Image (tube, coloured by chain):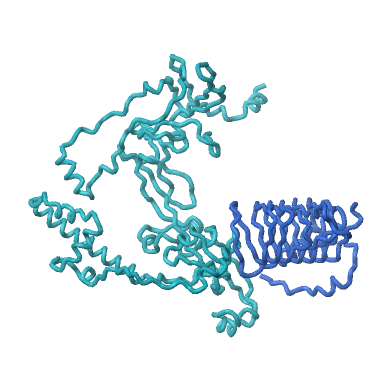
Chain colours: A cyan, B blue
Amino acid sequence: MAYLTQPDYVKYICSCGQLKPITSLYFCRHCLKIRCGFCICHEVDSHYCANCLENMPSSEARLKKNRCSSCFDCPSCFHTLSTRATMAQPRQTPQDPAGGDTKVESKQPKKMYYLSCFNCRWTSRDVGIPDQPVASGGWPERTNPFAARVNQLLDYYKAIALQEKQEKIERERKKFTIRGKYITLTDKTGLTGAMARNIAGLPSSDSSCSAIANFVPSQASAEVEELPEDYYTKEVNLNQITSMPQRLASPEWQPVSVSRLHPLAKLLSVKRSQRCRVCDHNLTKPEYNPGSIKFKIELLAYYHVPEVKIISHEPVKAGEKTALLLKLTNPTGHEMQIKLLQPEDLPPPEEKEEPKSIEKSLEKSLNLEKDTSSYKAIEREPQYSVTSRVTSPPTALTLAQRDDAAEYDDDAQHDTTE
Amino acid sequence: MSHNIKILPGATVCEDCTLEGDITIGGGTVIHPRVTIIAEGGPIIIAEYCIIEEYSTIIHKKSDQQENPPKPLFIGAHNVFEVGCKLESPCGHIGESNVFECRSYVGVDVKIGSGCVVGAACHLTAPQTLVDNTVIWGSEHHIREALEKQPSQLLQLDFLSKVMPNYHRLRKPNVHKRQSSTRQSQEPSPKP
């Protein structure tokens, strides 16, 4: 097995020129090439919550801002929060802000739930969130103070996107008749937000809908709130101030003091399938069920590429020969011919891309939606430094196929035969 | 050495643990097997309702500038010493409702208030004072302040004191101090 916790000594050259350990490589069975995470297509298969393992369709995930609705992370240490049950004690109810009605309806002790972090012992009580009568859900949701503005911006940019789409369709109809002017090129592609805003600002723009017309750009002002009097004299209690990661974890509120930390809805994870860019075949495809860690398709390099392990080596000295002992393993069920090459003997990456006219590539870059150049696999020469030379045996080696029976205990077999 | 051990009634102390020196164990306290408590620098007094789990070590270290008679190490009520934790303290007092998580280490010259949590594998070696309700956690020893004390482990204590005698040989209580056992009226423990 490859090294899981140790540094990766043996690295393999991916077809894109990256040097990677065998554990992070794939092998495309159709192109017969090694691929790595940098030169394959990553596709999101499904969204799920890693804590409750609930599957969520992507539209719902987008609606919920890629967060789980029932699981929470600790705002203090980002560990998953657990729900804990307590009995509501009557003496606590008068202090409780929501306790007025609970006191009336429950004469006997009632089960109440709060969130608690087992790592840093943060509890939802720390920030004054009242305990909930139900185990899951029902936690108060805070609204973003800038929700209205964010929605306004969203509507605005959606309107702009729509407008640009329509303009593009119109241009397509005109078949590039007015090409060549700088200004038309940019607004056709809608490359910059600033340019888009310019278009929106134009009162003559005929297709501007109400969202664009009603939009008010934000104004920068030089007036800032004054610092409190004791800002420089007050002693700082670092325990009361949130750290940078804690603030950035809730970008809407960015709490300054720990008393404002609220539970963070847990971020969803995705299952992704990976696809070769050259032949569009799947390299990995996970099972749909979030609880399963198995793959339907799993073309890992570990199953196809001979594994190289360094068994021992002597310290390398200048001008002297030292021994290097390698172990090669054939993971496949077929015999394998192996030849050791010098780095300079490596075959150069094949140049398949024919030179295109500038005209054609320009047109291509304009059609951003149909552009496939980002999906193209690019092959590069690997970059590495060599400080010593390996004198390799000139003959080709033959590796026998993997022996499945080798994993079984030999001694047990001996006992039965003798 | 082990003749000075005083176990108050109600305490559950397993036989398979190392107790050396002058040690007093309060009622309701549960001491698991394989615990090491060594009072070489002075007596150790463990108050009521503590849980001391397996492989934890509490040492009252000998120090050079020791007073005569030696000051006792007093460990307050409702402390939890989780598996493999180590406490070496000649400073006389440890508050109540503290939690020493698994494999934590509290060195000498660390004063601990009440309601503190020393997180799993956290090592406190520098001289310092933990104010009440301090929580230390993580490999980077983040510190935060909890609002309230850690909830007491009365349910767990109940369970342990019931189950422990079924599986382990226990040391018999050998002191019958009236004041500490009757005065400490059992709080109504929350039931599920």
Q: Quadrant of residue A174?
A: bottom left
Q: Is residue A133 visible?
A: no
**Residue B74, x across and y down, in percent:** 80, 63
Taking depth in this image into account, of A297 and A417 the one nearest to the observer is: A297
Q: Answer yes or no: is residue A33 visible.
A: yes
| Residue A36 percent across, percent down from the top left | 39, 38
Q: Given the current orientation, which residue lies at the most extreme right position? A: B3
Q: Residue at x 85, y 59 (%)?
A: B67
Q: For this view, does A166 lie left or right of residue A30? A: left
Nearer-the-camera pick, A199 or A27 = A199
Q: Nearer the viewer, residue B173 or B48?
A: B48
Left or right of A282? Residue A171 is left
Residue under the image location 37 percent in, 22 percent down: A344
Question: Residue A23, position in %: x, y?
Answer: 47, 37
Q: Position of residue A202 (x, y in %)?
A: 16, 66
Instruction: Tell me which residue sits at (29%, 42%) in the image.
Output: A375
Residue B155 lies, with reference to residue A355, above or below; the image says: below
Image quadrant in which you'd find residue A190:
bottom left
Q: Quadrant of the C terminus of chain A?
A: top right
